[in-house]
Image (cartoon, helix red, strand yellow):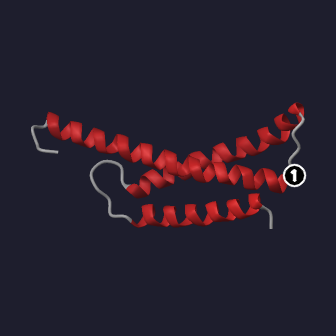
Amino acid sequence: MSILVTLGLLSFVFVAVFTWRAYTRAPGAGQSPRSAIIEAWANIAVGFSINFAANLLILPLVGATLTAGSNFWLGWIYTAVSIVRQYVIRRWFNARLVAMSKRLAGERP
């Protein structure tokens, strides 16, 4: 098994656990962790599809060649990084918005 496939499989397991954890967390104020992870997955599905097609078209133009399988696993590794990044940023902004709204309402955050 190549290092690319190994990293791809490890990232797949990580994302599955990360998704399950976010999906089962109790909702708080603002956007729930479940909504955030669903939004992240919708964005990732579109982004992965575009990335996969773009790699097949663009990489040969610069002399790089990837098999469809290698392209998939490379894309999946970047997808794992992307879904975590998007989820964390969304939750960070959500926490800031909730704190700001509480300050405006005169409550303690």
Percent x, y of residue 67: 87, 52
Q: Observer-nearest residue: 98 or 62?
A: 62
Q: Find disc 1 in the rendering and name its residue.
A: 67
Q: In screen coordinates, is 50 left or right of 70?
A: left
Q: In screen coordinates, is 72 left or right of 86?
A: right
Percent x, y of residue 36: 44, 51
Residue most extreme to the left: 106
Percent x, y of residue 99: 22, 41
Question: Which quarter of the figure has residue 46?
Answer: top right
Q: In this view, does 69 lie above or below 103?
A: below
Split into 4 quadrants, where in the image is the N terminus?
Answer: bottom right
Please report the residue visible at 51 percent of the width from the left and 51 percent of the height from the top.
84
Question: Which quarter of the figure has residue 33?
Answer: bottom left
Crowding near pointer 1: few (<14 within 10 Å), some, many (20+)? few
Please tell me how many numbered marks the rendered image carries: 1
Instruction: Say if residue 42 shows up in the picture.
Output: no
- The kind of residue on which mark 1 rests is Thr
* Element under disc 1: loop
Percent x, y of residue 78: 65, 48
